[in-house]
Image (tube, rainbow, N blue to C red):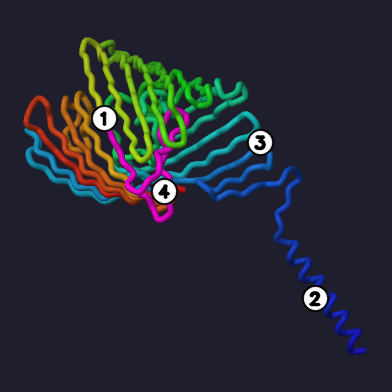
Amino acid sequence: MKTSSCSVLALLMLGALSTNAQAGQVRTDGQDIILSTKGGLKLQTEDKSAGFQIGGRLQWDYTQDESDTAANGNETLEDFDARRARIFLRGHFNDFEMKGEFNLAESGTSGGSVTDLYLKYKGFGEMANVTVGKQRVPFGLEVLTSANDISALERSAITELYTLDRSAGFKLSGRGMEDRFTYGIGLFEANGNGTNDFQEQAFAGRVTFAPIITKSSLLHFGAGFQTIGATDPLQESDTANFEVAGAFGPVHAQAEYFTSDVGPQKFDGYYVQVGYLLNGGHRPYTDGIFKRVKPVQGGTWELVTRFEEGDGDFGDVGLDEIDGQQTTFGVNYYMNDAVRIGLSYMDGESNTNSDSGNELRMRLQFTY
């Protein structure tokens, strides 16, 4: 009698445990779902026809800016805030892809703004993707490289003056010849997030070609144009861009030259940048732009220097839009795929008067 009672009790307990174990399972009525945590949290079907990804970045900076100008005299500014704090959502279904990226906070703003918000159609193949919405304008190498991936902590003053970065519009882009060739061309809002911005339009395009592209060597050439309309004809601009870049073992380098006609005025400027990975490795490159350094076991150190001269936006060192020159020195430590610690020093001066300025910047970056 005791044996029978124990057997019944054991069977009841096993049934209860089995029921509880099944209560927490996730089931699908289609293909298996693959979960990945590399480069963000990703869910996608086994055949990769549909998926969803969430990720973000936090760049926390300390800056000390010193400037000496005729307008403001000697001035020292010190700050400790989020340079960028963003979250993004990306999804795809068959030939359609969407992305939304939002600022939670950004230096100089209150946050809450949209950086990317677009829909892309990829059904025509790699040579013809159509993108509609707010996106990167295809013009320039440095500006198209993510702020997570640029070697210097801030983009050059030359890039800041001549490029639009992101804008709402329509773009046709593609790649071919085993990824050696890329192009992009589109029509965008020239300025603003208001209700009547498409009357002033920007037409931009870029083409790149990499005659050498291996696991350890790269040679890249690119060119672009950008035409910005305005209600005032004196504010209309036509800008051309030429770029060259290379990566050979631990050394990588890039340079760009911009020339622009704004009404009757002419402006131009250039920068040259060189980087070196101290403990080996190679700077990745894909789709016509550089990607973030992949650290080796124990982390990777990178040295970078940049010189620029010409008409540019030298606001980082307190000199605004002038004809000037600037030298940048930096060091980065890539702890792993998510964490980067960086230090940079920029020193700039005017080419037309005695105004000068410098900036010391330190950054802790986390991307996911």
| Magenta highlight range | 272-300
Crowdedness of circle 3 by 10 Å Cα count: few (<14), some, many (20+)?
Answer: few
Label 4 secondary element: loop
Residue 48 versus residue 211 in the image, above or below: below
Foreground: disc 1 or disc 3: 1
* Residue name at image x 40 percent, y 56 percent: 298
Q: Which residue is mark 3?
A: 49
Q: Amino acid at mark 2?
A: Met
Label 2 secondary element: helix
Q: Which residue is mark 2?
A: 13
Are circles 2 and 4 on residues that touch, CB within 8 Å? no
Crowdedness of circle 4 by 10 Å Cα count: few (<14), some, many (20+)?
Answer: many
Sooner in the amino-acid sequence: mark 2 or mark 4: 2
Foreground: disc 2 or disc 3: 3
Out of 232 and 177, give the one closest to the viewer: 177
- The location of residue 164, given as percent across then percent down, is 35, 26
Crowdedness of circle 2 by 10 Å Cα count: few (<14), some, many (20+)?
Answer: few
- The location of residue 107, given as percent across then percent down, is 31, 43
* Residue 10 magenta-highlighted: no
Foreground: disc 2 or disc 4: 4
Sooner in the amino-acid sequence: mark 4 or mark 3: 3
- The location of residue 191, given as percent across then percent down, is 35, 24
Sooner in the amino-acid sequence: mark 2 or mark 3: 2
* Residue name at image x 79 percent, y 71 percent: 16
Residue 49 versus residue 23 in the image, above or below: above
